[in-house]
Image: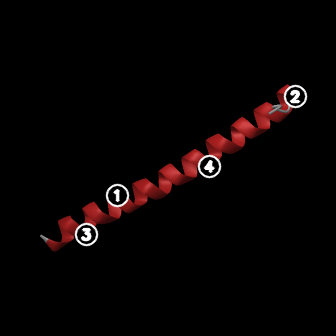
Amino acid sequence: MNVPAFTPEELARRRRAVLRTAWVIGGIAFAIFVAFIGRAVLAA
């Protein structure tokens, strides 16, 4: 299989998109974590 050669600009754009996606998913995971901890604290 041939891997397409990307220009440096295309690679940078893809890298930014991946980082943005990772931060969004991480933020959602953190919010869920905080919600569970908050529920435990408020229920106690």
How many residues crowd mark 4 within 10 Å: few (<14), some (14–19), many (20+)? few
Residues marked 1 and 2 touching at CB (< 8 Å): no
The three-letter code of the residue at mark 1 reads Phe
The three-letter code of the residue at mark 3 reads Arg
Instruction: Name the mark on residue 21.
Output: 4
Instruction: Name the mark on residue 7.
Output: 2
The three-letter code of the residue at mark 2 reads Thr
Residues marked 1 and 4 touching at CB (< 8 Å): no
Closer to viewer: mark 4 or mark 3: 4
Residues marked 1 and 3 touching at CB (< 8 Å): no
Q: Nearer the viewer, residue 20 or 14?
A: 14
Q: Residue at x 84, y 35 (%)?
A: 10
Above or below residue 34? Residue 18 is above
Of all residues, the one furthest to the left in this rendering is 44
Q: Nearer the viewer, residue 24 or 6?
A: 6
Q: Residue at x 85, y 30 (%)?
A: 6
C-alpha separation, residue under disc 1 versus residue under disc 3: 10 Å
Above or below residue 10? Residue 36 is below
How many residues crowd mark 2 within 10 Å: few (<14), some (14–19), many (20+)? few
Provide the secondary structure element on which disc 2 rests: loop
Percent position of residue 41, x then y: 19, 65
Q: Which residue is mark 3?
A: 39
C-alpha separation, residue under disc 1 versus residue under disc 4: 18 Å
Q: Residue at x 20, y 66 (%)?
A: 40
Provide the secondary structure element on which disc 1 rests: helix
- Quarter of the image that includes the N terminus: top right
Sequence-wise, the earlier of marks 1 and 2 is 2
